[in-house]
Amino acid sequence: PKLLLGEKKRTRGACDDDGDGETTASENTNQPSAKRRLLFGRYVQLIQCAPNVQAVYKIVRKLTGNIGGNGYSGPIYGELTMHSMQKMINLMMETAGLGESSRFIDVGSGIGKPNLHVAQYPGVAFSCGVEMEHTRWSLGMTCLKACLDVAVHNETQNSSSITNKSNQIQGNTMFLHSNILEAKTFDPFTHVYMFSIGFPPDLWIQLAEKWNESNPETCMYLICYHGPKDIIDCYEFEVELVAQTPTSMHGSKEGHMGYIYKRTNTGTDESEDSTTSRPSESGGAIYCDPLFETSYKLV
């Protein structure tokens, strides 16, 4: 598997647009670009985020505070910094084919930052978050509405001047106030994301069952923060490790390793039960679990 440590060393302390202080420091002594910032006598290079991504985080921060959700359940949920999330997305694009045709779900989406992020960059076709806690789901809906209001306003005011998609706030996002255990599979999603720190064992067992029953031709990548010993050996997700990278938490020095897994059961050796339990997808139709069907049709 690929360990994304690269040629750069992570440091902390620089002021950036997300207020998280996360940077990657370069040992290059050449004249730095305008986007580099000086930190303790060294030049640093921030992981770059698209303008619409930065605009969305600014809207969310204004509505929910720096920690997110005005601190509500923050210690329980946790949030990646904008730049750490961008690093995970860059790795997903490089190793897991995340792109404009992808369908992305965040299990335990909180106030929805990862969903809003991937909807802007790379601009996925469908971004869905599932959250049980009503207050955080409600905050997520408030943030989504505010983002869409800004998008409509910008389109009305600057319809002829905005040509770069990275400057436009995108939609394609839905938040469900639901229990993921109500779903039988993760269909129609191609990428299943979960900030899994704190997930109990019984939840993992049920998530693994849903993953293994999902469409092996389309539901291909699992992104979480538990290593292969848990995901593969203990809970028996039918996956293999593709890549991993360290990440940082918002508002603290805590960090977690992010892992990207690829499905190993490709559908050629499906059991009779799993083959017959899913409707046929002939004619290019995409099967969708009933829990997500209404939202998918709306987007």
Image (cartoon, rainbow, N blue to C red):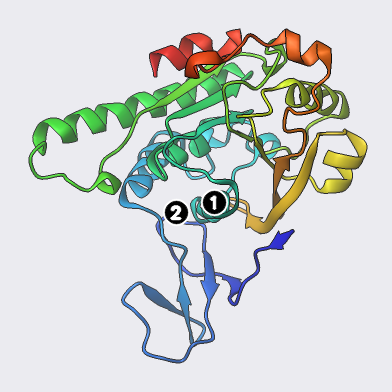
Along the viewing direction, whichever of 102 and 279 lies nearer the viewer: 279
Q: Position of residue 207 (x, y in %)?
A: 77, 25
- State the image coordinates of residue 262 (x, y, percent, origin top left): 70, 42
On the image, numbered disc 2 is attached to which residue? 18
Q: Is residue 161 above or below residue 293?
A: below
Q: Tell me, yes or no, whether the two marked residues, 1 and 2, touch with CB atoms within 8 Å.
A: yes
Q: Is residue 5 visible?
A: yes
Secondary structure beneath disc 2? Answer: loop
Under mark 2, the amino acid is: Asp
In this view, which residue lies farthest toward the bottom?
29
Q: What is the crowding at mark 2: few (fewer than 14 residues within 10 Å), some, or many (at least 20)?
A: some
Frontmost residue, 256 versus 99: 99
- Which residue occupies the foreground of this view, 192 or 83? 192
Q: Is residue 22 left or right of residue 269?
A: left
Q: Quarter-wise, where is residue 217 in the image?
A: top right
Mark 1 falls on what kind of element? loop
